[in-house]
Image (spheres, rainbow, N blue to C red):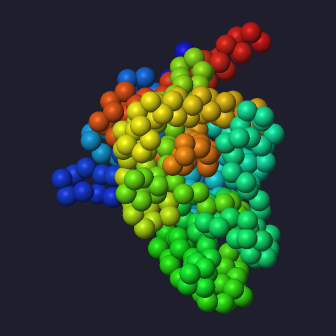
Amino acid sequence: MKKLKLGVVVAKIDIQQQAQGTSYLMPEPIYFKELALASRKHNIDLFIISAMEWAEQGLFGYRWHSDAWHREPVPLPDIIYDRCFFSHAKQRQAYENMLAAFKHRKGYQSFNNTLPNKLIVYDSLSTVEELIPYLPHTEPLNSMASVTKWLSLYPEGVVIKPAAGMHGKGVLHVSYQAEFKQFHIRGRNLRNESIEISFSNELNALKWLYRFKKELSYMIQPYLALRTKDQKPFDIRVLMQKDHTGQWRLTGSMARVGHPHGLTSNMHGGGEAYEPYPLLAEKMGSYKAERLLKKIHMISGQTVSAIEGHFGRFGELALDFGVTAQGSIWLLECNSKPGRLAFSEDKADSYRHAHERPLAYALYLQQRVASSQKVI
């Protein structure tokens, strides 16, 4: 079988040279290097590409060799592994134009299908009977009047967040503090900067939220008190990946813990990763912690199957779960471009699988295509 050409696509390539001669390829320097090193063991020609490096004359990409990234001509990929985090519409359009050109020239396989915005994912999962108990009440935020209505239903407040957001950017907790007769808003803006502001007047608070939201599509949910014993926000990140046989496997789960007064536990917002069992056991006892983790892993398997049933084939998905002090489990989010920051080298098996399973699954896709061509 011919050598697999795997193109890892990013929105923009940024090389950072270090004094000792090594280089880092942004935006995921550790992950890209680990992928490149592991690709040698699997005999895969792996290169990082961007639409900004594509022209009608040919494609340039970055390969790792001699302990550094090198820009050089690369072939059209057999499989596209999308790691694009777009910062503006021009990048997305350039990416789509590049893929259209690839398809016209030779065709390619996608590692993952595209996951739509969170509202569409929520609506789809809410049709799956087994998952309904774990989905928080969610609606599109079409009017600021909804905030007032929801605050009357949920005394601890509501969370509003972008339907297409990531990394905790643009997520706000809105509450009414009756003892102070104030509307309190805290969270992060779209630049991932902390925000905290209060209003004594409801109309002023809603006007501020309207300006903050702008024209973006937002969703509203109840605020869930998902905190550790020392009042830090936390969630459980589960990484599900397909293996060399095309079957879903649990790669690992980690607890992501944020700052004491923060709203989210996202690693990009300064969160830290811990083993989930000790954290849950400290909160609710060892027996209940063990049962909760098993249940979260079971729900994860049901969720990835449901997502594929609605949105097509995926090679990996990350799922974020909240656990309340009472032991209720909530499925908070699904992510088709999961980061690896929560999986450290301390957990050797999970760390290795997190980096190598994408390559094993890419080889499986190649073999499947080759087999179908032989049958034809």
Q: Residue furthest left?
A: 20
Q: Quadrant of the image for the N terminus?
A: top right
Q: Position of residue 223 (x, y in %)?
A: 61, 61
Residue 162 visible somewhere in the drawing: no
Residue in front for this viewpoint, 129 or 318: 129
Residue 123: x, y in percent? 79, 48
In this rendering, the answer to whether 205 lies above or below 35 is below
Please give left or right for residue 212 compared with residue 267 in the image.
Answer: right
Residue at the spot 53% in from the left edge and 70% down from the top edge? 187
Q: Judge from the rendering whether residue 215 lies leftward or rightward of residue 357; answer left or right.
A: right
Look at the image and tell me in which quarter the C terminus lies: top right
Q: Residue lying at the far top in this picture: please name it.
A: 375
**Outermost residue, front side:** 179
Q: Residue at x 47, y 55 (%)?
A: 227
What residue appears at the point 40 percent right and 53 percent down from the top-left corner? 229
Task: Residue 68 in the image: state x and y as whole percent.
Answer: 30, 45
Question: Which quadrant holds residue 87?
Answer: bottom right
